[in-house]
């Protein structure tokens, strides 16, 4: 019972951050379109869930490694696949094919990286 509240808070925070990243990529016109921020927020939560499941499954078979260059490539591929799945599941999210998914995943990854640098400097 004590773990559900932090899980819900973490999910909401991931949804907001992912929603901002998806909305930013949408505004930049780089590989995906989303109708509004609410749709970007929902897409962020669903895509984070899909990435979590795929990463967990890859970890079970020993493919997912946490870091390094190979880990970054695996994360990019997983994020692009999650965007493609999200584009199929959510009518308000449109992904411009596989190339658009990779471009959007790369931009979202850069936004997360910059956010981490900024938060690291603040905290």
Image (cartoon, rainbow, N blue to C red):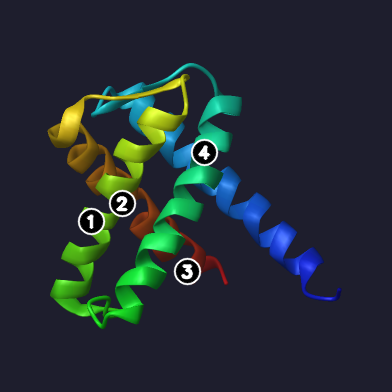
| Residue at image location 41% in from the left, 71% down from the top | 56
Q: Residues within 10 Å of mark 1 (few under 14, many from 20)?
A: many
Residue 18: x, y in percent? 49, 45
Q: Nearer the viewer, residue 110 or 11?
A: 11
Q: Earlier in the sequence, mark 3 or mark 4?
A: 4
Q: In the current view of this chain or complex, which residue is farthest to the top?
A: 35
Report how far apart the C-alphas of labels 3 and 2 lie in the structure.
Answer: 26 Å
Label 1, secondary structure: give it: helix
User: Which tag is nearer the camera, tag 3 or tag 1?
Assistant: 1
User: Which tag is nearer the camera, tag 3 or tag 2?
Assistant: 2
Report how far apart the C-alphas of labels 3 and 4 lie in the structure.
Answer: 22 Å
Residue 108: x, y in percent? 33, 46
**Pointer 1: what residue?**
76
> Pointer 1 and pointer 2: residues touching (CB < 8 Å)?
yes
Q: Is residue 117 left or right of residue 20?
A: left
| Residue at image location 36% in from the left, 67% down from the top | 55
Q: Is residue 44 left or right of residue 96?
A: right
**Pointer 4: what residue?**
19
> Pointer 3 and pointer 4: residues touching (CB < 8 Å)?
no
Q: Residues within 10 Å of mark 4 (few under 14, many from 20)?
A: many
**Pointer 2: what residue?**
79
């Amino acid at each position: 019972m004590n773990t559900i509240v932090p899980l819900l808070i973490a999910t909401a925070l991931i949804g907001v951050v992912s929603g901002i990243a998806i909305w930013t990529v949408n505004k930049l016109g780089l590989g995906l379109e989303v109708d509004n921020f609410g749709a970007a927020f929902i897409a962020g939560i669903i895509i984070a869930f899909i990435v979590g499941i795929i990463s967990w499954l890859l970890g079970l078979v020993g493919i997912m490694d946490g870091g390094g260059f190979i880990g970054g490539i695996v994360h990019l591929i997983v994020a692009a696949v999650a965007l493609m799945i999200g584009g199929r599941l959510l009518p308000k999210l449109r992904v411009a094919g596989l190339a658009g998914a990779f471009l959007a995943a790369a931009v979202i990854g850069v936004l997360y990286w910059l956010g981490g640098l900024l938060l690291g400097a603040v905290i």
